[in-house]
Image (tube, grey):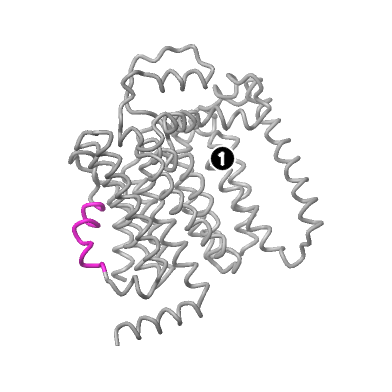
């Protein structure tokens, strides 16, 4: 019972923030101040995966230090950048120690995230009537959709596999139509992938090929209908301006390009300072990258305020801020967990929906979400994926226990 309360309140208290150099939450203060209490050297002997990941995180940390020294970044900005990496590892390691004992504790992590949203709300204004009318896409995307998503993940452990798959597909498509395109697509894709695993024994390569072709045509048909409705004014979501500003809105790649201009601009900034980056939270002093962002949006607006260099990507942002070495270590971390997650899906146990969703979120947030996700959401995905991977390999765990016994003898 104590473990449940700890996990629950850890995720809730990420919503209680203080200003200290940057923004730091009560949960982060707890993770940092208690690290040497919950840290156990034997964990790294029992689970060699932790040792590998510790090396990746260490490489990332020291590549950041090298970059900050070379570019001469301010102490406060450098410290904020390093803190993200430290908290990310502490958060991941703390949750892993609980999930490796009982994966059902993920329910209380999800419940904590849900209550955090309900208690502290969101900075985006709106209500359900705005969402239904199509005017509250931002409110839907950042508030309603994550709450509903967490509820679906929790229900997935209690409902039948087929029911959950159908439910996620339907809700995912509803979110897409209402304006939460990325989150809705991930939920729908979670359902489609789980659908495949449910009927996998009945499926051969020929069926997979024709089903894939069918789904591509159906998906594009829905996309074509969605774009037509937006252009005709029948759908007025908060992101409709993106479609209306495209030269060829019926090409979905153009929409991705338009919706993620910060990531593209971040990559250009990374290329401009390839080896050591610009430093954490580096400002766009010349305005070059803000002008470039307006250019990619086909906008005639002239930016007048230049803050930090945009990137909106954990992976690209690591390269933009701290150069190629930081980029490579970040890539290794994301790739390591993604691969273990894919291996875990193949076992298709009762946590399959959560694992699939976490993998898709890991990939999406790693490429297209701001660096803050590396300390907040990604550690939850990391810890649960790794614990699931180890649970799926009981013989590997037995060998690890034998090695630990020999080492401590």
| Residue drawn where x is 60% and y is 58% of the image | 164
* Residue at the disc numbered 1: 175
Magenta range is: 27-39
Is 43 or 351 nearer to us in this picture? Answer: 43
Residue 51 against residue 77 in the figure, above or below: below
Is 71 or 131 nearer to us in this picture? Answer: 71
Residue 264 falls left or right of residue 234: left
- Give the SS element for disc 1: helix
Q: Residue furthest bottom?
A: 409
Residue 283 against residue 322 in the figure, above or below: above
Residue 406 against residue 319 in the figure, above or below: below
Work out which quarter of the rendered image holds the C terminus and state it.
Answer: bottom left
Residue 136 falls left or right of residue 125: right
Q: How many marks?
A: 1
Estimate the x, y position of residue 214 in percent, counting from the top left. 77, 45
| Image-quadrant location for residue 166 | bottom right
Is 171 or 45 nearer to us in this picture? Answer: 45
Work out which quarter of the rendered image holds the N terminus and state it.
Answer: bottom left
Residue 130 seen in the current view? no
């Amino acid at each position: 019972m104590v473990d449940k309360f700890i996990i629950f309140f850890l995720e809730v208290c990420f919503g209680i923030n203080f200003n200290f150099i940057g923004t730091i939450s009560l949960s982060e203060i707890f993770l940092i101040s208690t690290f040497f209490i919950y840290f156990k050297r034997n964990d790294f002997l029992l689970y060699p995966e932790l040792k590998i990941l510790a090396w990746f995180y260490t490489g990332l940390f020291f590549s950041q230090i090298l970059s900050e020294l070379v570019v001469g970044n301010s102490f406060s900005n450098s410290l904020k950048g390093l803190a993200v990496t430290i908290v990310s590892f502490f958060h991941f390691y703390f949750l892993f120690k609980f999930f490796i004992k009982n994966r059902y504790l993920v329910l209380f992590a999800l419940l904590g995230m849900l209550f955090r949203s309900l208690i502290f709300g969101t900075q985006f204004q709106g209500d359900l009537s705005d969402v239904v009318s199509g005017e509250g896409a931002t409110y839907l995307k950042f508030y309603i959709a994550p709450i509903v998503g967490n509820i679906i993940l929790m229900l997935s452990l209690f409902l039948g596999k087929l029911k959950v798959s159908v439910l996620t597909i339907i809700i995912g498509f509803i979110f897409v139509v209402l304006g939460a395109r990325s989150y809705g697509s991930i939920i729908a894709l979670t359902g489609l992938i789980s659908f495949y695993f449910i009927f996998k024994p009945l499926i051969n390569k020929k069926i997979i090929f024709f089903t894939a072709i069918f789904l591509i045509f159906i998906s594009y048909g829905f996309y074509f209908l969605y774009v037509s409705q937006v252009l005709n004014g029948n759908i007025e979501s908060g992101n409709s301006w993106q479609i209306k500003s495209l030269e060829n809105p019926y090409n979905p790649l153009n929409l991705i390009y338009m919706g993620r201009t910060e990531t593209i601009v971040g990559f250009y900034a990374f290329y401009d300072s390839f080896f050591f980056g610009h430093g954490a939270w580096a400002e766009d002093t010349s305005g070059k990258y803000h002008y470039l962002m307006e250019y990619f949006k086909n906008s005639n607006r002239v930016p007048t305020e230049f803050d930090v260099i945009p990137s909106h990507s954990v992976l690209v942002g690591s390269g933009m801020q701290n150069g190629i070495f930081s980029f490579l270590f970040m890539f290794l971390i994301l790739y390591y967990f993604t691969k273990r997650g894919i291996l875990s899906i193949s076992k298709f146990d009762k946590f399959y929906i959560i694992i699939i969703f976490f993998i898709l979120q890991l990939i999406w947030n790693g490429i297209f979400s701001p660096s803050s996700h590396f300390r907040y959401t990604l550690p939850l995905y990391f810890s649960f994926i790794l614990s699931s991977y180890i649970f799926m390999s009981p013989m590997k765990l037995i060998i690890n226990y034998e090695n630990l016994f020999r080492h401590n003898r």
